[in-house]
Image: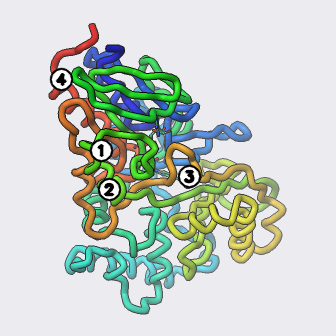
Amino acid sequence: MDFDVAIIGAGAAGISAARSLKSQGRKVVLIEAGSRIGGRAWTNEIYGLPLDMGCGWLHSAERNPLVDLARAEGLDLVEGRTAWQDQWRDLGFSPHDRKAALEAWSEMSERMEKAPPASDRASDVLDTNGKWNAYCQSLSGYLNGAPLERLSVEDFLAYDRLATQSNWRVREGYGTLLVRSMPAVPLYASCPARKVRLTQSGVRIETVKGAIEAGGVIVTVSTSVLAKGLIEFDPEVDDHLHAAANLPLGLADKLFFDLHGAHGLETETHLLGNPANDKTGSYYIRPLGRPVLEGFFGGPGAIAIENAGILDAFTFALEELTALLGSKIRHHLKPIAASSWCHAEWIHGSYSHALPGRAGDRERLAKPVGDKLFFAGEATSRSDFSTAHGAWESGIRAAREFVQHNPQATVL
Ligand SMILES: Cc1cc2nc3c(=O)[nH]c(=O)nc-3n(C[C@H](O)[C@H](O)[C@H](O)COP(=O)(O)OP(=O)(O)OC[C@H]3O[C@@H](n4cnc5c(N)ncnc54)[C@H](O)[C@@H]3O)c2cc1C
């Protein structure tokens, strides 16, 4: 036996599971398909700026375990309000309309609570011909990575009821925080796991670089990777794979512009591209005072920009921005980076949502398979799915389950 536990995937869930097991004296190995750790937490250093291509916000900060970790690492936590609901100088979206649009969203959420549809389909609580339906769809895109038609009401509410309004950032980047949290355990990077087999004494994992034997395994890969069959499992795991297919990853993507010259745009403000378009971008202006404009696209908007390709995606964003700010803004904006999470080879999407009627599949996916095979990752969280802290907590949960089932270390 090589290790007590092998962990497949070195994202937030894999790193937290590894830390937890190492601190309990277990011999751990992390197996990562990609060449870097962090998964969907990825701080990309561009022009000396730490830009988060995936997660950036420490949601529900009061109870987010990564807040304490950031403090312990001496990173610079940035508290305070977000600019998401601002519209700089009211351009293209008047205060009256903003209030009405937000009310339409709140009323829709209230209908979910008070009169959930038998279909469990979130679009069934949309106001028929509601003036702000496209706006509600664009918010669903940002929050869930998916349109309301594909969303379970029960699942949405499980998150919404427990989420708080505190959203913080770490100046050095969320991805940087995850990298700093990596414990000193062996890491096999650029080493996709291809097959996981249960054996008499534990598990055997076949990777592109050879086989690894361990007392047990924690699988933290995304639901898209599971549902696509990119790792082969024993038939006992079929139920989990079906559950994963009902918790698909939605899509969210970011485009970054360098912002230079006398553009006049103020720091920490925001523009929604077009509230009447469900594919519109949400543009965060000079986040953390940086000379950057960060565009965020979700659901159908993110699908549209990935399908269009990177050049047309930036063109679309520039068109939305010039419609609001005038054509001179083009002289101040230079495309510098874009994510493409649908095409990320070992992830295939952004964050999970449950399809209508399938909220219970998060628990199905989180269930241990016997006493050797455990699942973690954001999609296994009942109420904090789609987040880095939900993933982090799921890794700790899976580590605890492993130890409960395997009280003795096998490798001394
Ligand atoms: C654009 C975007 C914005 C986001 N914004 C936020 C935010 O502001 N706040 C927030 O909390 N969350 C946000 N999220 C979500 C958050 O990033 C994720 O929920 C979280 O990082 C998922 O962590 P994980 O460990 O579950 O999965 P992952 O990060 O996907 O980790 C799984 C790892 O498994 C590896 N892997 C896959 N297949 C194999 C294999 N066969 N063998 C070995 N390794 C394999 C992958 O390479 C990956 O590194 C955002 C995500 C995106 C994409």
Classify mark 3 as within 8 Å of ligand 1 or not, answering yes or no. yes
Separation (CA) of disc 2 from disc 1: 9 Å
Q: CA distance from mark 2 to mark 4?
A: 36 Å
N-term-proximal mark, 2 vs 1: 1
Amino acid bearing label 3: Trp
- Identify the element where label 3 is drawn: helix
Mark 4 and mark 3 lie on one chain; the one further toward the N terminus is 3
Position above or below: 26 against 101:
above
The residue pinned by badge 1 equals: 63
Q: What percent of the width, then of the height, locates residue 118?
A: 21, 79
Mark 1 touches mark 4? (CB < 8 Å): no
Residue 309 is situated, as x and y percent measured from the top left of the image, at: 70, 61
Q: Earlier in the sequence, mark 1 or mark 4?
A: 1
The structure residue drawn at horizontal position 51% and vertical position 63%, both measured from the top left corner, is: 84
Q: Which mark is residue 341?
A: 3
Circles 3 and 1, Cβ within 8 Å, touching? The answer is: no
Quarter containing the N terminus: top left
Image vertical order of residue 44 relative to residue 285, above or below: above
- 2 or 4: mark nearer the eye: 4
In x, y percent, where is residue 167? 42, 52
- Whether residue 330 sits left or right of residue 64 in the image: it is right
Mark in the foreground, 4 or 3: 4
The numbered disc on residue 406 is 4
